[in-house]
Structure formats: C-alpha cells, structure tokens
C-alpha cells in the first residue's frame, strides 16, 4: 500500500496558510487565496494527466519526474508494476514448465472445467484420445468420448476404481481412465496406455484356458474307465482305491470347468449385451438345487425377494455368481443351519445377499477371500469339494456388470455375501414379465 510522508492534505494546508499570510501582508487575503488555490488545482490536474497518460502507455519504463507526493506516487506505482511483471513472468515460467513436462508424458492428461468442458490437454491426449486443438477446446468431454460406459463412469462422480476401454482413435490400444477432482468442481482425466499389460494378461489367460481345455479329454477318459471298473465286482481294497480316484477325478473336472469359466470371464472387462434376467425364478431354482446339495444336513433356505424389481445382465454369468454363493453357504454351514437369500433395490442399485449362521470367517482372511485358490481352511475346503475359485468367479462376474461383491463375517456369528449391482441395471419387474 502507498504511504508517503508528503500528503496532499498537508500540501493543501500549507498552500492555504502561505497564501493567507501573503494576502494579509499585501491587503488582499481573499484574492490571494483564490489565486493560490487555482494554481494549486491546475498543478494537481497537470500531475494527474501525466499519471493517466503514463498508465495508458504500453511501456512503463520511463517514469515521469516529479517532486513531493506525486514523485513518490509515481515511484511506488512503478515499483508495484515491476513486481507484478516479475510475478507474471514467474507464473508464465511455471505454466510453461508444466506444459513442457506434461507434454513429455506418455499418459494423456486432460483438464475439464466444472461445466464438463475441455480446457487443456497434452500431446499424448491428441494421440490416444483424438483431441484437436483447433476444434475441441471448450467442447463437452462427453461429446468427444461418447462410449456409454465412459459416460456412466464420468457421471457417477465416484472415481475410486479406474475404467478400462479401447482408445476411441486406435482400436488396438487399451486405455485405463482415472479421474481426479480438484478446485471448484474441476477434474483431471488421465488416460494410460495399458495395451502391453493387457497383452501379457491375455497370454496368461490363454495359457490357463488352453491347459484347462487340454486336460478335459484325458480326465473324461480316466473317469469313464473308473466308472466302468466301479460297476464291476472288485476286491474291497481295489474298490476303495478306485472310488477315491473317481472322486478326485470328478474334483479335477470341476476345477477345470471353473478355470475355463474364469478364463472366459477375464477375456473382457464388460458384458457385451445386457438383457433382462429372470432373477426371481433364478433364485428359486438355485434354492431348490441348494436343498438337494445339502439334503443330508437338514438345512433351511429362506428367500426374501422384492417383487417390484428385476435385473439386466448376462443370465448365465449371474446364475454362476449366485449359485456359487448359495452352494458355498450350503457346504460350509453345519447341519441344521439356516440360510437366507435376499433380493432388494434402493437408490444405490440392486442387491443380492446370502446370509448364513455358519462358523464365520476371521477378519484377517476377508481381504483375500476373492483371490484365486485362497482358502481359509485347506482341509475343510478339500472335504467340501470346493475348487477355491468360486469367489473369484463371483468377483469377475460383478466387475463385468459394473458391480462389486462385499463380505461381512464374524467368528461364531455366520457370514453375509452381498452382490451390489449398479442402478442402471435395475429394471421394473414388468419389463421382465414382458420379456
């Protein structure tokens, strides 16, 4: 702020006092005061005009010369302008360095304002997303990236998980989108090329799928011969050995089938077509199969199904996910236990839960339950005939439908496995009935 030891008020008072003194000396104090004030005012107007003309010039290096408070004011304004120029230059350097560093990145970076309009992007965005400086600045990001899955991801405003899609301009490239909020509703979109990672993942999936497929034929032959031998009269020791071999071959066939299913689910991140799913009749059918599976345990399986809503998705995949959860509950819930199946919807979407009163699971195991072949109790899983892939299959089915699987459990108090489907997949039951 401008502070001067020479103030305009002090100068005015000095002028008035001096003119009055001179006026009294010569005998015309009024005229002397008027003339002095006139010249004082003309001087102020002249200095103000000099200041205005100087400020209107583009070059402010030639500071007007003056005395007193006007000179101090000119000098202070000049120093402030120099400081402002230095700050502006420093900010320009920072922006220039940011643009240079971001332009060198291989990841596409896009800045989006609070109204979803494109503000700035680097060169990688032009290559991976097809943005053009001449035409796309100020356009809505959803007019440029029109894939419905991206639009849903962008509009849900929850960006904890990334989104994987093919590049809109290079169909052989797979991009991973991440969005971060900043400022007053602005967003940064980062698109990373993960084609190489997807290729490596695809190689692994192909190996598992091919190995599993090749195992099916010898397992079928082995099991066929074992069943033939078991139909004949055999000595007790040999019969016991062949029975164990037949049981293990059946378990191997189940493992191969689950590996093939998991490999198929991993081939794409999203379902290709979303169709009405008869969720109510599907749950009822799985309940009957669960009762047959646990008929020796005398368990009860209750259902609580909201009749007003149904679901969109791939029927076979959803059946696999729900049946895995229900059959797991049947296997691990002790005799006389109770299992409850529930379907409902709310503002967050559709939900299917399987709740049992079994032994429960220690909390240290919950984060890893959805990993392939992870087992809480190896011996218990082996006795139940599980493959260790059931929850991994459920996880991938939910990911392909844009949902997730959550698990809550306490030792001695049972477990609850819940599938959460996004709101856009929930439909009125009337649509299901018409379909």
Image (tube, rainbow, N blue to C red):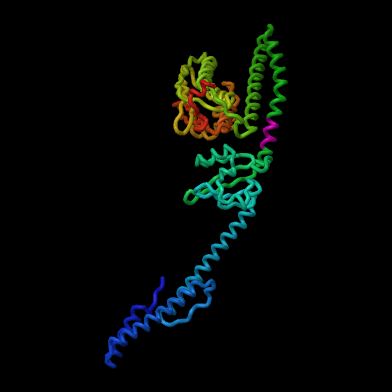
Give the left or right position of residue 59, taking residue 308 as reference. Answer: right
Q: Which residues are magenta?
A: 201-208
Can you name the residue that lies furthest to the front here? 31
Q: Residue at image x 52%, y 68%?
A: 85
- The quarter of the displayed image where residue 219 is located: top right
Residue 204: in magenta span: yes
* Quarter of the figure that contains the C terminus: top right
Q: Does the stretch in magenta take in 370? A: no
- Magenta: main secondary structure: helix
Please tell me which residue lies in front, 48 or 14.
48
Q: Is residue 133 left or right of residue 81?
A: right
Q: Position of residue 343 (x, y in %)?
A: 47, 25
Give the residue at x 53% y 75%.
61
Q: Judge whether 410 appears above or below 150 on screen.
A: above
Residue drawn at x 64%, y 19% as measured from the top left = 250
**Residue 186 or 33: which is nearer the viewer?**
33
Q: Nearer the viewer, residue 80 or 227?
A: 80
Q: Is residue 392 above or below residue 60?
A: above
Can you give x and y, in whole percent of width and height, for residue 420 in the image?
A: 50, 31
Rendered-image quadrant of the N terminus = bottom left
Q: Position of residue 434 (x, y in %)?
A: 52, 21
């Amino acid at each position: 702020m401008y502070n001067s030891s020479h103030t305009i008020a002090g100068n005015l008072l000095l002028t008035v006092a001096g003119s009055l003194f001179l006026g009294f000396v010569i005998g015309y104090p009024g005229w002397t005061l008027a003339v002095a004030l006139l010249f004082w005012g003309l001087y102020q107007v002249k200095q103000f005009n000099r200041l205005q003309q100087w400020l209107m010039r583009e070059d402010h290096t030639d500071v007007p010369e003056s005395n007193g408070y006007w000179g101090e004011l000119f000098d202070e304004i000049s120093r402030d302008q120099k400081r402002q120029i230095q700050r502006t230059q420093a900010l320009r350097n920072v922006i220039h360095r940011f643009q240079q560093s971001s332009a060198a990145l291989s990841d596409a970076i896009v800045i989006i304002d609070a109204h979803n309009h494109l503000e700035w992007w680097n060169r990688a965005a032009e290559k991976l997303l097809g943005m053009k400086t001449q035409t796309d600045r100020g356009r809505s990001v959803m007019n440029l990236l029109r894939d419905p899955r991206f639009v849903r991801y962008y509009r849900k405003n929850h960006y904890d998980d990334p989104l994987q899609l093919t590049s809109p301009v290079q169909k052989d490239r797979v991009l991973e989108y991440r969005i971060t909020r900043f400022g007053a509703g602005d967003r940064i979109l980062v698109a990373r090329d993960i084609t190489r990672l997807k290729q490596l993942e695809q190689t692994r999936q192909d190996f598992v799928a091919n190995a599993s497929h090749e195992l099916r034929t010898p397992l079928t032959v082995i099991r066929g011969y074992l069943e033939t031998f078991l139909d004949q009269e055999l000595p007790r020791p040999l019969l016991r050995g062949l029975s164990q071999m037949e049981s293990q071959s059946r378990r191997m066939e189940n493992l191969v089938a689950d590996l093939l299913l998991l490999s198929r689910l991993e081939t794409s991140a999203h379902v290709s077509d979303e169709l009405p799913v008869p969720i109510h009749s599907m749950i009822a059918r799985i309940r009957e199969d669960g009762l047959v599976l646990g008929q020796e345990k005398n368990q009860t399986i209750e259902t609580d199904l909201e009749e007003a809503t149904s679901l969109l998705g791939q029927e076979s995949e959803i059946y696999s996910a729900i049946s895995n959860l229900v059959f797991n509950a049947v296997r691990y819930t002790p005799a006389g236990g109770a299992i409850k199946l529930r379907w409902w919807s709310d503002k967050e979407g559709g939900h299917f839960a399987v709740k049992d009163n079994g032994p429960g699971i220690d909390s240290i195991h919950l984060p890893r339950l959805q990993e392939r072949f992870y087992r809480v109790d190896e011996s218990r899983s082996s006795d139940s005939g599980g493959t260790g892939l059931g929850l991994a299959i459920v996880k991938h089915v939910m990911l392909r439908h844009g949902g997730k699987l959550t698990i809550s459990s306490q030792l001695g108090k049972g477990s609850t496995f819940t599938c959460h489907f996004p709101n856009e997949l929930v439909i009125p039951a009337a649509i299901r009935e018409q379909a």
